[in-house]
Image (cartoon, rainbow, N blue to C red):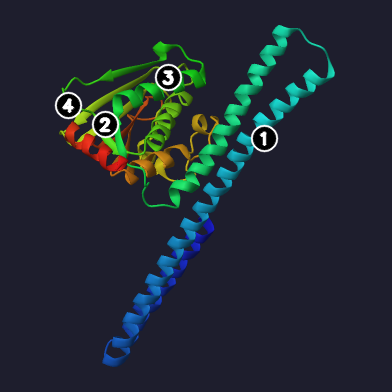
């Protein structure tokens, strides 16, 4: 990438020098000036655009290679672990208690393997369609509670590790969307908050209504944080913050890409905030609210009809 950037800068510099020289040599002749200046400007613009596209392609290839490496590791590790446990069980007799422990660990590894496969498949699925065809009223309180229970069970956490704070506005917190996809987005945000809290997760989930028009789910943690320059980039596909504490943590770079894609397909957005590295982060999912419960009931009747 550095090579292409330097080459592009040098070529632009040469084109600028030639353009200036052409102007100096032909400043009294109208026709050469009229033809030469636009030609050199187009040449400079073409070299600059070509350099930009080359740099973007190099970056995309680097992210793609990092994704392949991460996915390979995420697939290979649980398979190797399951195989090791099976070989141990096959080769020597074991007590029932230890056998049960091995079965439990193999089940955890298989769930991790299935989670990685589902995430990769889901990323390809949401990227191929503009919007989901399933649109039903979804009550966000119950959905958030279900996602928190799923995350606690998946990471074997105590109930105090993730707290839920529901803003008391008296307004219904309902959105129209695909419950399965919304659950995928929320679980990915919660998984990130837990994964990137190496000193133990202290996660706070806040459910609120913003300006009567939006339902916002904010997940705040006290983990490794996000450098300000990377707050928008983390939602790109395959992108992982190039910080040692992040790269040490297992991941594919698809989780937050899924979150933003699903949010935008539902008419909302995903937002990341962080005071800086080592100071925690807040990831928010913002979705358009159904303005009246009656509207939700009518929509459900139409779906059934």
Is residue 32 toward the left or the right of residue 180 in the image? left
The alpha-carbon separation of the residues under discs 2 and 1 comes to: 37 Å
**Crowd rating for badge 1 (residues with CA inside 10 Å; few <14, some 14–19, many 20+):** few
The alpha-carbon separation of the residues under discs 4 and 2 comes to: 13 Å
**SS at mark 2 in the image:** strand
Query: Which comes sooner in the sequence, label 2 or label 1?
Result: 1
Q: Measuring 70% from the left and 7% from the top, which residue is drawn there?
A: 97
Residue 174 in view: yes
Residue of label 4: 171
Say if mark 3 contacts mark 1, CB within 8 Å.
Answer: no
The alpha-carbon separation of the residues under discs 3 and 2 comes to: 19 Å
Mark linked to residue 149? 3
Is residue 100 toward the left or the right of residue 30 in the image? right
Q: Position of residue 171 (x, y in %)?
A: 17, 26
Q: Measuring 71% from the left and 30% from the top, which residue is drawn there?
A: 80
Query: Which comes sooner in the sequence, label 3 or label 1?
Result: 1
**SS at mark 4 in the image:** loop
Q: Position of residue 168 (x, y in %)?
A: 19, 19
Say if mark 1 contacts mark 4, CB within 8 Å.
Answer: no
Mark 3 or 2, closer to the camera:
3
Q: Position of residue 227 (x, y in %)?
A: 39, 35
Residue of label 2: 216
Query: Which comes sooner in the sequence, label 3 or label 2?
Result: 3
The alpha-carbon separation of the residues under discs 1 and 4 comes to: 47 Å
Give above or below for 5 relative to 13: above
**Crowd rating for badge 2 (residues with CA inside 10 Å; few <14, some 14–19, many 20+):** many
Query: Which comes sooner in the sequence, label 4 or label 3?
Result: 3
Outermost residue on the front side: it is 305
Give above or below for 276 relative to 40: above
On-image quarter of the C terminus: top left
Mark linked to residue 233? none
């Amino acid at each position: 990438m550095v090579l292409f950037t330097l080459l592009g800068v040098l070529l632009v510099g040469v084109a600028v020098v030639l353009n200036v020289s052409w102007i100096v040599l032909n400043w009294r002749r109208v026709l050469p000036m009229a033809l030469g200046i636009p030609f050199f400007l187009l040449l400079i613009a073409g070299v600059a655009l070509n350099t930009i596209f080359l740099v973007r392609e190099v970056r995309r290839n680097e992210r793609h290679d990092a994704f392949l490496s991460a996915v390979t590791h995420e697939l290979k590790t649980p398979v190797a672990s399951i195989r090791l446990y099976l070989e141990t069980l096959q080769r020597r007799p074991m007590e029932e208690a230890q056998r049960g422990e091995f079965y439990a660990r193999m089940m955890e590894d298989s769930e991790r393997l299935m989670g990685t496969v589902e995430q990769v498949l889901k990323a390809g699925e949401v990227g191929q369609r503009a919007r989901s065809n399933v649109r039903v009223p979804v009550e966000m309180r119950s959905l958030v509670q279900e996602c928190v229970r799923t995350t606690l069970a998946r990471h074997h956490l105590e109930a105090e590790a993730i707290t839920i704070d529901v803003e008391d506005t008296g307004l219904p917190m309902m959105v129209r969307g695909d419950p399965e996809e919304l659950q995928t987005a929320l679980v990915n945000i919660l998984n990130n908050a837990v994964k990137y809290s190496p000193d133990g997760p202290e996660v706070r989930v806040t459910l609120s209504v913003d300006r009567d028009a939006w339902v916002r789910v904010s997940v705040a943690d006290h983990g490794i944080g996000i450098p300000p320059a990377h707050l928008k980039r983390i939602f790109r596909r395959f992108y992982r913050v190039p910080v040692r504490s992040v790269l040490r943590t297992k991941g594919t770079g698809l989780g937050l890409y899924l979150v933003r894609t699903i949010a935008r397909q539902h008419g909302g957005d995903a937002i990341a905030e962080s005071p800086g590295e080592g100071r925690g982060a807040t990831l928010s999912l913002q979705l358009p609210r159904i303005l009246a419960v009656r509207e939700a009931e009518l929509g459900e009747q139409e779906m059934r009809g």
